[in-house]
């Protein structure tokens, strides 16, 4: 299925991304990351490029469409488009997500709302590797243009599952953990046994009654106490680093 340019313009809206099954990635860096990922993931080769004359000579194995700068501005949600956009089938990115390699851990995000946070979290997971992103119901769309940009291409390298019920986690992960100021320090050796870390909504978190019902063990990141909380993406970053840190460094 190839979309018309009028349909591509509609992909800024989630309902059309879901209806057509496509999303867009804007800019040189994201297109380069897509092409790199496509070398190893054949379904991504079904993606297409839209370019202005400035990028007419762009070398790519993907099908290219030459459009005007005005048409490019209608496709993109940035004020000054670079002049190159990829049209990507959602199914091409999602293929293989159901497979859980041995030793893979997961990050569960409960009703996360900020697309920038999600994109940054995906970058962290791609950097450390071996981590899957599980998005709970009512979470931000990972194909949101702001999420795609913030991911800097990590979207093509991190397994993502959407609409995962919180109560389903014990079925797939033996050792659940969450963050709570009443928990044990993150440096506690038991933290490394965690197979799925649960993080809450930026403003509301996850109700303790729910994490307790799941049997999630609580851990905390010690701080000075000068402020009440950390940015969600920063917390995920610290936890992913702690999980990946060699035992000899502890």
Image (cartoon, rainbow, N blue to C red):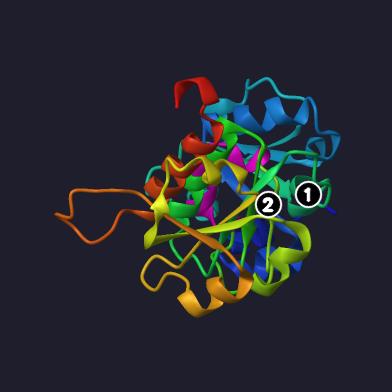
* Left-right relation of 116 to 102: left
Which is more toward the observer, 36 or 174?
174
Which is more toward the observer, 174 or 25?
174
Residue ID at (80%, 35%): 45
* Left-right relation of 214 to 200: right
For marks 2 and 1, the one nearer the N-term is 1
Q: Which residue is mark 2?
A: 160
How many numbered marks does the figure carry? 2
Which is more toward the observer, 218 or 73?
218
Quadrant of the image containing the C terminus: top left
The picture places residue 102, in percent across and down from the top left corner, at 80, 39
Residue ID at (45%, 68%): 201
Quadrant of the image containing the N terminus: bottom right
Asked whether the beta carbons under mark 2 and mark 1 sit within 8 Å of each other, the answer is: yes
Q: Is residue 197 magenta?
A: no
Q: Which residue is mark 1?
A: 97
Regarding residue 62, the answer to whether it shows in the image is: yes
Residue ID at (14%, 54%): 226
Residues shaded magenta: 142-156
**What's the mark number on residue 124?**
none
The picture places residue 248, in percent across and down from the top left corner, at 51, 20
Q: Is residue 165 above or below residue 32?
A: below
The picture places residue 189, in percent across and down from the top left corner, at 51, 40
Q: Is residue 139 above or below residue 194?
A: below
Q: Secondary structure at mark 2?
A: strand
Q: Is residue 123 above or below residue 38?
A: below
Distance CA(mark 2)–CA(mark 1):
6 Å
Classify residue 202 by image quadrant: bottom left
């Amino acid at each position: 299925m190839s979309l018309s340019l009028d349909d591509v313009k509609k992909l800024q809206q989630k309902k059309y991304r879901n209806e057509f099954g496509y999303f867009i990635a804007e800019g040189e860096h994201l297109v380069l990351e897509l092409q790199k990922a496509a070398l190893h993931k054949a379904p991504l080769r079904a993606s297409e490029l839209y370019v202005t004359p400035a990028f007419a000579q762009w070398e790519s194995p993907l099908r290219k469409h030459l459009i005007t700068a005005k048409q490019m501005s209608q496709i993109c949600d940035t004020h000054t488009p670079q002049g190159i956009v990829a049209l990507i089938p959602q199914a091409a990115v999602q293929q293989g997500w159901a497979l859980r390699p041995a030793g893979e851990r997961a990050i569960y995000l409960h009703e996360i709302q900020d697309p920038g946070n999600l994109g940054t979290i995906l970058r962290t997971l791609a950097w450390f590797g071996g981590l899957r992103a599980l998005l709970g119901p009512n979470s931000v769309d990972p194909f949101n243009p702001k999420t795609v940009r913030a991911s800097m291409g990590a979207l093509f390298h991190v397994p993502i599952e959407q609409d995962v019920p919180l109560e389903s986690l014990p079925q797939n992960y033996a050792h659940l953990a969450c963050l709570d100021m009443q928990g044990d320090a993150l440096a506690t050796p038991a933290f490394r046994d965690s197979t799925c870390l649960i993080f809450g909504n930026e403003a509301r978190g996850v109700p303790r009654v729910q994490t307790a019902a799941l049997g999630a063990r609580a851990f905390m990141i010690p701080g000075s106490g000068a402020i009440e909380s950390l940015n969600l993406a920063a917390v995920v970053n610290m936890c992913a680093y702690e999980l990946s840190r060699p035992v000899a460094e502890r």
